[in-house]
Image: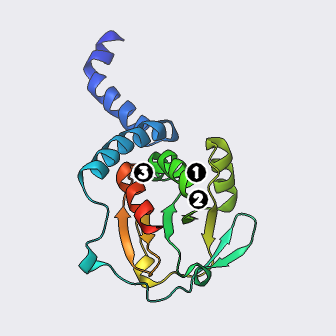
Amino acid sequence: MTKFLRKHFTNILFFGFILFLFTPYGLPVRSTLIKGVSFLTTRVFSLEVDEDKQKVLSSYYWTLRDSEGVDINMESLKGKVVFINYWATWCPPCIAEMPSLQKLYSEYKDKVVFLFVANDEPDKVGYFMREKGFNFPVYFQVSQPAEELRSKSLPTTFIINSEGKIVVKKIGAADWNSNKVRNLLSSLVQ
């Protein structure tokens, strides 16, 4: 038996690594690795869109439904600072940034409108939120957003100023509770 193990040790390690990494057991490890890399890049690179490249929303028509079944239309948010985050329960980068999003939401929920848009089944999202202890508001899309707010990647986050300009568009995880983001939000809500 020992000769067999020695002979196939590399194959066993490789198979174990793949099995661990690509099964639910590996999710915490993947999330932690992604969190470390993405939070480092948030500190190094700017999240803000250059002012000359900032797009203005072509339409505020976008209907979302909250976890209680109540619809909200983005039309009602004109003139407010809006933070939009697309995410899913099965997305490791989304999970990695969730604690920082929760902290940011807890601090700015009275000053900024947060739209956490889940790309998942409501039951799964509800279970996930309870298990992780998150209390930020979750929405589900009823209609499509303006073209400028569409993304095929998760997570994707937008920050829209009170004039309807997209000042942040970030694809991938980030440290949303950083001084950089807090300073930006504080400047937008003054």
Identify the residue at horizontal 34%, vertical 27% (top origin): 12
Q: Residues within 10 Å of mark 2 (few under 14, many from 20)?
A: some
Dots 3, 1 in contact, CB < 8 A: no
Look at mark 2 in the image and give the residue it sits on.
109
Q: Nearer the viewer, mark 3 or mark 1?
A: 1
Quadrant in which residue 14 is drawn:
top left
Q: Residues within 10 Å of mark 3 (few under 14, many from 20)?
A: many
Dots 1, 2 in contact, CB < 8 A: yes
Look at mark 1 in the image and give the residue it sits on.
106
Q: Compare residues 113 and 96 and report the one nearer the observer.
A: 113
Identify the residue at horizontal 44%, vertical 81% (top origin): 163
Is residue 170 at least partly visible in the picture? yes
Q: Amino acid at mark 2?
A: Lys
Compare marks 3 and 1 and give the one earlier in the sequence.
Answer: 3
- Left or right of residue 116: residue 184: left
Residue 29 drawn above or below residue 123: above
Identify the residue at horizontal 29%, vertical 12% (top origin): 3
Residue with the most extreme bottom position: 58
Look at mark 3 in the image and give the residue it sits on.
93
| Image coordinates for residue 129, horizontal then vertical, percent | 64, 49
Q: Quadrant of the N terminus?
A: top left
Q: Determine whether the residue tagged by mark 2 lies in a helix, strand or loop.
A: loop
Compare marks 3 and 2 and give the one earlier in the sequence.
Answer: 3
Is residue 89 at least partly visible in the picture? no
| Image coordinates for residue 126, horizontal then vertical, percent | 68, 54
| Image coordinates for residue 76, horizontal then vertical, percent | 62, 81
Q: Amino acid at mark 1?
A: Ser
